[in-house]
Amino acid sequence: MSTQLEAPPERDDKALGPLTQQGAGVVADGVFRWVTLLSGVTVLVILLLIAVTTTRQAWPAFSEFGTSYFFGTEWIPPEGLYGILPLVYGTVLVSLIALFFAVPLSVGIALFVTELAHRRVRSSITLVVDLLAAVPSVVFGLWGFYQLIPIFQTVFNRISDAVASIPVLNLIFGSGSGSSFMSAGLILALMIIPIITSVTREVFLTVPENDKSGSLALGATRWEMIKGVVIPHSTGGLTGAVMLGLGRAMGETVAVALLIGASPQISANLFGRGETMPAQIFRSLSEAGGVYRSALIGLGVCLFVITIVVNVSARRLVLVIDRRIKGTV
Amino acid sequence: MNNASPESTEQIRLSLSSANLSTKRRVRNAAASVAMVAAFVIAAVPLFAMGASVLSQGLGVVLSVDWWTQPIPGDVGRADLAGNQDLCGLGFGDAAECEAGGSSTSVIEGMQPAIVGTFLTVFGASAMAIPLGILGAVYLHEYGKNGRLARFIRFMTDVMVGVPSVVMGVFIYTIWVLKFGTNGKSAFAASLALGCLMLPIVVRSTEEMLKLVPNALREASAALGTRTWKTTLKVVLPAASAGITSGCLLAVARAAGETAPVVFTIGYVTTTNFSMRGQNTTLSAQIYSQLTNGGSIATQLAWGAAVTLVGIVLVLTLTARAISSRLTMART
């Protein structure tokens, strides 16, 4: 034992390897860095590939029909009419109906969670919202198709009968069908509530606690505090949340395909049948060939572009708000 | 005001109590509270109604062993329409079968191919998207940080989360199915589409979790002379593993429920195909196609598939929630 202690170990430079800038470790580090970088770049590559390959497949339709593809008002594939406006119209209209119903509800739920509910209730509310987000689109569609369409049919007919003699309303709420813009919009509203609620909730949570207690200390009621502090502080974030909901709504496919009635038309009648871009792609792409197929893929390209624009502007808004909040703190 | 008598403090206390609000303000406040609760109820009622109808319509078939072991009855739409029920009504058909309740007796309701197909596609998608996504997030958080490229990738990942699933389907359809023809339709092609869908979700949720790993851990590991790659693999990722698991489970749940990207890319079968190659089917695709088939047996199959699918998705979602709530409890 003692002899071992007397002999001091010789300095071993190799043992210091990990602390120096040489050796196998450096290579592993470099490799790992590149592997992660490549994985990160995959996202960009996929997005680029989506844009390039789909546009290439859609090109025959774009070049053959030109402006009549983008601005044509009739989509009747058997007759060779490929004007996407009715589908764009359906997509936008259905999404707006969905936002009309979903935004107030989502803001209400988010306020309920952040301002009103007791801590113990809070988790069960978020559970319900999470469950709503978890239900697959096709199950919403199945339920809507079998259970809601008959109900919608009677309700819509009753409403359109009631407003039949009022000038403008009788155009908007004309004779009803169970599957319609309105039916699709309503089921879609239910489906986008979770995303709007969760983003809105995040936004509300960034409202400084001091501002809120200050307002309450000045004698404001809870509602006055919400109106005077929470909402003004959150307008930008709310806009972002709504845009994200819009992006989600425009891309939603199966549930809408099952409830909208598969009839591409531009009509003011919310109770009439319609068609959206994703629903049309979904219904027809598998069986389509030739120029019809490339017209459908073209729809995908348009949808891709539109949702990217919506999402980029939504993210920009949320980013700006992030920065502003960080600036004030 | 200065000489505070007992009465005036009493008055101040009274004036601050909510009983002293003007009726208008009090009513508005109460109305707002009621509206918030109502918003929640309006969203919750359809959820429970949907849950109730899915369970009541579909639970019956799911409980039989055949559902999990038998092939999907083919062409049930036509068999049902032209089948026993009409014949019974006209006095034809097997009398015993008619008495037993008509057409449904002759069909064995099974969904094994779709259950197997769902697991195959989701497994394939996860095998591709989860490692890539985690590594991508490691780049963003451990290497790229706030650099130009990292910020750009982060932004585009957010954008990619918003790309509709049907577009992913169209994408894989153009690069895979159009290239290889009908042979290209397979569980693998569907996995590719679902993988594209999952990737950005995994990247973003993993990065959020990496943010929560305290820097002290990285520094301590570096101070011991560990290389960054080893620190990341042996210290940072294990520390974040629970959160990453939870995020990945949510991405898996999302992929399992998707229909649109699957129908173009997977084809259709009625017998079980355990291979990633060759046409296949999933629960979500079955719900859609049985629903469009029409007829009572097909409807029954659709509801049953819905129960199965919702069950799978719920298990994944609730597990993810349980993991993440245990995390927050541990942290606080």
Image: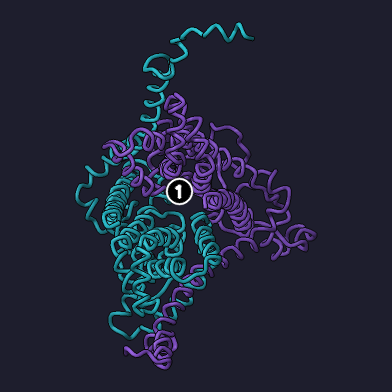
Give left or right: position of A164 versus A16. left
Which sits in the foreground, A87 or A192?
Answer: A192
Dot 1 falls on a residue whose secondary structure is helix
Q: Residue furthest left?
A: A67
Instruction: Tell me the kind of residue under disc 1.
Output: Ala
Which sits in the foreground, A121 or B259?
Answer: A121
Quadrant of res A48: top left
Quadrant of res B198: top left
Spot occupied by residue B320 in the image (x, y as percentages of width and height)? 55, 49
| Residue under the point 46% across and 78% down | B34
Residue A261 can be seen, yes or no: no
Spot occupied by residue B247 in the image (x, y as percentages of width and height)? 49, 45
Which sits in the foreground, B250 or B219?
Answer: B219
| Residue under the point 43% across and 69% down | A115
Q: Residue furthest bottom?
A: B7
Spot occupied by residue A216 in the image (x, y as percentages of width and height)? 37, 75
Q: Which chain is purple?
A: B
Quadrant where the image shows the N terminus of chain B = bottom left
